[in-house]
Image (cartoon, rainbow, N blue to C red):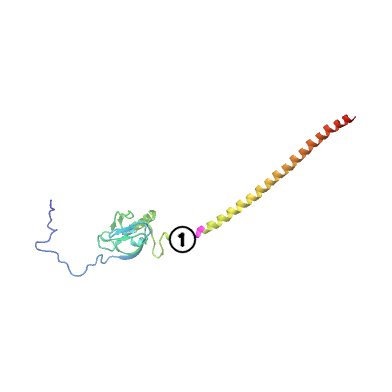
């Protein structure tokens, strides 16, 4: 069924739109900003023209505070794609109309004009782990985590290795070696040598000497 056209939606009969010469600048007169963004994740991220840039994928590292209440300065329907590890320079523009933002990542869900809404959005950003690099800081937020371990790892190895050799090696030599010599050496000399002389020598003299004297007499 064909939709009925209302009177104010159509042009008068035999009339048409006539486009002027030259180009039309979009978003003219609105506040704009340029930011450097980096994809720290392992997946490509595509961002549409009117997505609230403050709430884009949490693996995208940039100054999110500067992007609050702004979207990409692109014609509607366009988008950008950021591959893993890539760095892009993006142009942002302030929202028009009532400056109310709903949905996206759920960090705002309301007006972007008030200071309270701005503060609450920044708190939610930190709670949910969205990467943020404040203006004036060099490097990505995960750079601190990558630089810390190389400084601590050598120190830990240097402390643990000497401790193991100093405690275990002396203990084995001082306790076990003297104990074996003290127990075995005296036992062999005191028990076997006297026993052999005490039993055999008197027995031979007592039995054989009287027998010889009786036969001769």
Question: Which of the 4 quarters of the picture holds residue 76?
Answer: bottom left
The residue positioned farthest toward the bottom in the image shown: 22
Q: Residue at x 59, y 54 (%)?
A: 165
The structure residue drawn at horizontal position 68% and vertical position 48%, both measured from the top left corner, is: 178
Depth order, front residue of 12/142: 142
Residue 53 shows in the view: yes
Classify mark 1: residues with Cα within 10 Å, few (<14), some (14-19) or many (20+): few
**How far from the left and from the top, in percent, is residue 54?**
33, 59
> Is 114 displayed left or right of 146 in the figure?
left
Q: Which residue is mark 1?
A: 147
Q: Main secondary structure of the magenta part?
A: helix
Out of 209 and 82, give the one closest to the viewer: 209
| Whether residue 70 can be seen here | no
Q: Where is residue 208, by image quadrant?
A: top right
**Residue sitting nearer the eye, 81 or 186:** 186
Q: Residue furthest left?
A: 13
Which residue lies at the image location 52% right of the left edge and 59% below the top edge? Answer: 154
Q: Position of residue 163 (x, y in %)?
A: 58, 54
Magenta stretch: includes residue 24: no
Q: Position of residue 91 (x, y in %)?
A: 31, 65
- SS for callout 1: helix
Residue 206 image-quadrant placement: top right
Q: Quadrant of the C terminus?
A: top right
Q: Nearer the viewer, residue 74 or 44?
A: 44
In the displayed image of the protein, which residue is found farthest to the right? 217
Q: Where is residue 166 shown, x and y percent of the image?
A: 61, 54
- Magenta-highlighted residues: 149-153
In the rendered image of this protein, does residue 105 appear above or below residue 19?
above
């Amino acid at each position: 069924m064909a939709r009925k056209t209302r009177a104010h939606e159509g042009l008068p009969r035999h009339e048409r739109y006539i486009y002027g010469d030259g180009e039309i600048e979009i978003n003219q007169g609105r506040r704009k900003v340029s930011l450097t963004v980096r994809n720290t994740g392992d997946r490509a991220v595509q961002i549409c023209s009117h997505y609230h840039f403050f709430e884009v994928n949490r693996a995208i590292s940039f100054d999110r505070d500067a992007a609050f209440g702004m979207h990409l300065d692109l014609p509607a329907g366009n988008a950008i794609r950021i591959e893993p590890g890539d760095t892009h320079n993006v142009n942002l523009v302030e929202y028009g109309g009532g400056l109310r933002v709903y949905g996206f990542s759920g960090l705002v869900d309301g007006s972007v004009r008030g200071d309270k809404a701005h503060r609450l959005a920044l708190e939610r950003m930190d709670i949910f782990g969205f990467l943020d690099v404040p203006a004036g800081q060099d490097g990505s937020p995960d750079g601190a985590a990558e630089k810390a371990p190389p400084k601590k790892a050598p120190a830990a190895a240097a402390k643990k290795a000497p401790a193991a050799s100093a405690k275990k090696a002396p203990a084995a030599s001082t306790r076990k070696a003297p104990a074996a010599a003290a127990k075995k050496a005296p036992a062999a000399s005191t028990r076997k040598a006297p026993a052999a002389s005490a039993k055999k020598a008197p027995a031979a003299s007592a039995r054989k000497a009287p027998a010889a004297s009786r036969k001769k007499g």
